[in-house]
Image: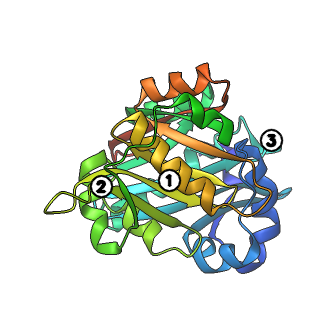
């Protein structure tokens, strides 16, 4: 291990780390605000890892263990600490942590234009599994979609629904169930009320921001049904939603043609856990 790497001490997150977490969260370059201190304390701190050195905290990561998958929810290296191998060292540590928890695979999301991060993750055996685009959608943009589908009914998503939704829309096993257990997520699904058993036509996770991530619909008309419900649940004065659309180029094109602004383009990377030593 080089001297630039040995200066970093990796440690679990603490409740008092919220301020530095909130500051580094801004480096993600996303529109949503950093989670407030109560959410940090209840949902995030115990799943975080920090790298601390002579100049302070140089990086943090937030993870979930989702059965066979280790999920790197966030990995941020501070500007002053970049180029020192710290990101690889964090990933090395996380790989060991996930293996100790029985995982054999790992997954994360990364911006498509973040070349240094993509080079790191692909060197560790991760490969693109799906693309997603986040767009800022207003009520006016809904007019570009076909009329809301009459055969869809929006219902709350229960923990028992998560397995079927995960299979229907190709999500990481366990990820939706983890969101369902979190107070900062509001899961809603779209079902066919005429089907004898629940047939899922779409789903969304309404988060602070406000944002919808993930968001799936089997057609643009079903997407409009979900979005009209989402706008109906927004606080007064909220005029737009950041909607993350995965693997649905026609819907993305409809929104772009209507003038919706692209805010983020990401890749979901998956891979077998490997020996991530430098």
Place of residue 65 in the rendered image (x, y in percent of width and height, measured from the top left): 40, 65
Q: Which residue is mark 1?
A: 72
Residues under labels 3 and 1: Cα distance? 20 Å
Q: Is residue 124 left or right of residue 18?
A: left
User: Is residue 91 visible to the viewer in this orientation of the structure?
Assistant: no
User: Outermost residue, left direction?
Assistant: 196
Question: What color scheme is it?
Answer: rainbow
Q: Residues within 10 Å of mark 1 (few under 14, many from 20)?
A: many
Dividing the picture into quarters, in which one does residue 98 lie?
Answer: bottom left
3 vs 1, front mark: 1
User: Is residue 179 visible to the viewer in this orientation of the structure?
Assistant: yes
Up-down relation of residue 249 to residue 124 (above or below): above
Q: Which residue is mark 3?
A: 79
Q: Residue at x 63, y 33 (%)?
A: 141
Q: Residue at x 36, y 36 (%)?
A: 219
Q: Which residue is mark 2?
A: 166
User: Mark 3 or mark 1: which comes first in sequence?
Assistant: 1
User: Mark 2 or mark 3: which comes first in sequence?
Assistant: 3
Residues under labels 2 and 1: Cα distance? 18 Å
Residues at badges 2 and 1 in contact (C-beta under 8 Å)? no
Up-down relation of residue 179 to residue 145 (above or below): below
Q: Is residue 56 left or right of residue 227?
A: right
Q: Residue at x 39, y 57 (%)?
A: 70
Q: Residues within 10 Å of mark 2 (few under 14, many from 20)?
A: some
């Amino acid at each position: 291990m080089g001297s630039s790497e040995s200066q970093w001490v990796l440690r679990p997150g603490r409740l008092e780390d919220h301020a530095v977490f909130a500051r580094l969260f801004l480096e993600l370059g996303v529109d949503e605000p950093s989670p407030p201190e109560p959410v940090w304390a209840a949902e995030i701190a115990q799943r975080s890892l920090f790298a601390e050195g002579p100049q302070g905290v140089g990086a943090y990561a937030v993870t979930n263990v989702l059965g066979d998958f280790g999920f790197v929810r966030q990995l941020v290296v501070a500007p002053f600490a970049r180029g020192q191998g710290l990101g690889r060292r964090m990933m090395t540590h996380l790989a060991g942590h996930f293996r100790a928890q029985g995982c054999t695979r790992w997954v994360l999301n990364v911006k498509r234009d973040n070349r240094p991060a993509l080079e790191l993750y692909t060197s560790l055996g991760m490969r693109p599994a799906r693309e997603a685009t986040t767009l800022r959608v207003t009520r006016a943009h809904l007019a570009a979609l076909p009329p809301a589908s009459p055969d869809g009914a929006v219902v709350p998503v229960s923990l028992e629904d998560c397995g079927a939704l995960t299979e229907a829309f190709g999500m990481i096993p366990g990820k939706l169930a983890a969101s369902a257990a979190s107070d900062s997520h509001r899961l809603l699904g779209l079902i066919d009320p005429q089907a004898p058993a629940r047939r899922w036509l779409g789903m969304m996770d309404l988060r602070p921001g406000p944002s919808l991530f993930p968001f799936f619909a089997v057609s643009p008309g079903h997407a409009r049904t979900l979005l009209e419900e989402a706008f109906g649940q927004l606080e007064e004065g909220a005029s737009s939603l950041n909607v993350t659309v995965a693997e649905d180029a026609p819907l993305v094109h409809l929104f772009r043609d209507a003038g919706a602004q692209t805010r983020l383009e990401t890749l979901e990377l998956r891979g077998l856990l490997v020996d991530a030593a430098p």
